[in-house]
Image: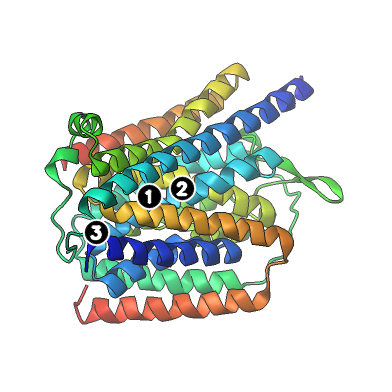
Amino acid sequence: MSVLVFTLIILIGSYFAGLLGSLTGLGGGFVIIPLLTLGLHVDIHYAIGASLVSVIATSSGSAAAYVREGITNIRLGMFLEIATTAGAMTGAILAVYIPTHYIAILLGVILIFSAVMSLRKKSEQIVKHKNQWAEKLKLNSSYPTAQGTVNYSVTKVGGGFVMMLFAGVLSGLLGVGSGALKVLAMDTIMRIPFKVSTTTSNFMIGVTAAASAVVYLQRGYIDPGISMPVVVGVLLGALSGSKILVHTQSSGWLRWVFAVVVAFLASQMIYNGIIGKI
Amino acid sequence: MAQKISFKDTDMQVVIGWVLRIGVIVSISIVFFGGIIFLYRHGQEVVDHRKFVGIPDFIQSFKGIMYGIITFRGQAIIQFGIILLIATPILRVIFSTIGFVLEKDKLYIFISLLVLLIIFASMLSGHAG
């Protein structure tokens, strides 16, 4: 295969990955690693590097919009970034010692988990419970809604912090944003309104990915020839996705389609990991 | 007092929004430009990324990348754009730190410096490994 054909295939694949990722909220990185490793027989190290770079691009791009709307809780994000960056650094260091087929299997498991998470029903929850740590760290905040400004409180700060540490390790190890885990930590443990947890998670993903990308960059995981079409394609796809979202309400069936696709790719990753082909 | 703080917080939101937006636009444009040069020069070559062999020597160091940019090598330009992209969220943390300094929020100055320190440590760990 020539470089030109290889680049075009990745570009088109990444475009659709970014499009679906933004429409469903799962992020484009999810399909990239299976596409590169299973579809184009690229070594998983390069795939992780390219995926990580695309994660930074999409999360920074969309965080730019959310931050200005004032939904993102910057202090909460900042505080939890201590955990995610420390975790990401650990994950990137661990990645050297873990055989690639285990990484493939773990990635498959996380993919399936995230697909299931994306199908979950979302309900806005407002907690007005006093938490000593949340008050000390000034984490309680408010966000704008159609009905006016809503105040909310944050609970179980310690539990959320530990969960973020774990999310960071997985992000550094697998080259994904692990947004699903971050949202889970903020939604179910810290009991933050869904809109705030998704935008704040997105806000944190860029810094988390950057913390491990600085390691991967020096190790030669980030190959320009592979990363270039991935990052351009995913970003353009995510941009079109956000344009479509403005016009149509995100449809349930699309979520299902994407979840099924991701689950299929995930099982392929696990299968190939088990038979040692990755 | 409370009102003054919330005013500064919205300022910070605007600045952070711009840092992220400009960072992504600039770095992706550079990556795209480098990509065109790369394809023009190497488009007909055969790819093989089955085995992990790292990246070409000339883009291994920052000095090499700079030299590559001057000599108009596509991969060096792409890699430079990618480094800028990786720097974008880190730059965002630096700007938040400045924002917290302006707000005189000591706790969050400490927290954002700690995040920067972790990223810096991560950078050094990659260097050693």
Q: What is the x, y in percent for residue A97?
A: 18, 57
Badge 3 sits on which subunit?
A
Q: Which residue is mark 2?
A: A57
Residue A83 in sight from this viewpoint: no
What chain does badge 1 belong to? A
Tell me the residue that label 3 is attached to.
A45
Q: CA distance from mark 3 to mark 2?
A: 19 Å
Q: Chain of mark 2?
A: A
Determine contact: label 3, label 1, CB under 8 Å. Answer: no
Label pair 3/2, CB-CB below 8 angstroms: no
Circle 3: residue type: His
Q: Which residue is mark 1?
A: A53
Q: Quadrant of the C terminus of chain B?
A: top left
State the residue in front, A23 or A133. A23
Farthest right residue in view: A147
Query: Residue at image x 74%, y 42%?
Result: A142
Precedes in sequence: disc 3 or disc 1: 3
Secondary element at tag 3: helix
x, y percentage for residue A277? 20, 77
Badge 2 amino acid: Ala
